[in-house]
Amino acid sequence: QVHVVESGGGSVQPGESLRLSCAASATIYSSTAMAWYRQAPGKERVFVAGIVSNGMSRYGDSVEGRFTISRGNAKNTVYLEMNSLKPEDTAVYFCKMSIRGHDLWGQGTQVTVSS
């Protein structure tokens, strides 16, 4: 069974940075697309950033210019570099990988931005 696991969350102050990591295990297949979503308390899960196999990426309006998504050298790994963090970035961040037509989600990692 394929597992998607996020890491790198934590508590930071406004203006600081964090780097999230995500990896899928137990599969020989490569993902066609990888993305990050986030869900704040009491709100719906929303798209943050995504990247496809040819390297093209796109971002949600609220993070454009501050966050960067990138693929790792290892198969099925993806990172989210988050700079200039704001309190409104506080959420659980989820990684989604599309592998052989299936969308696989991780359990999420908490990011808290507070002074």
Image: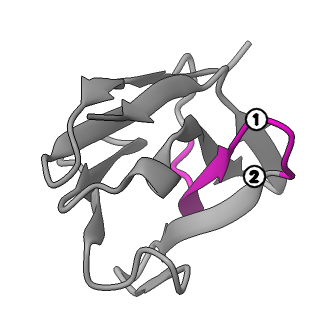
Q: Position of residue 53 (x, y in %)?
A: 45, 73
**Residue at image location 73% in from the left, 61% down from the top:** 46
* Residue 30 is inside the magenta segment: yes
Q: Which residue is mark 1?
A: 41
**Residue at image location 18% in from the left, 60% down from the top:** 83
**Residue at image location 30% in from the left, 48% down from the top:** 79
| Residue 6 drawn above or below residue 94 | above
- Number of numbered markers: 2
Q: Which label sits in the foreground, 2 or 1? A: 1
Judge from the rendering whether residue 66 lies leftward or rightward of residue 111; answer left or right: left
Quarter where residue 108 is shown: top right
The quadrant of the image that shows the C terminus is: top left
Q: Position of residue 35 (x, y in %)?
A: 56, 59
Q: Amino acid at mark 2?
A: Arg
Q: Position of residue 74 (x, y in %)?
A: 24, 39
Q: Amino acid at mark 1?
A: Pro
Helix, strand or loop at mark 2:
loop
Mark found first going from the N terminus, 2 or 1: 1
Question: Residue 100: which disc?
Answer: 2
Q: How is the image coloured?
A: one colour
Residue that sits furthest to the front in the current view: 115
Mark 2 Cα within 10 Å, few/some/many (few <14, many 20+)? few
Question: Residue 93: which disc?
Answer: none
Q: Which residues are magenta?
A: 29-44
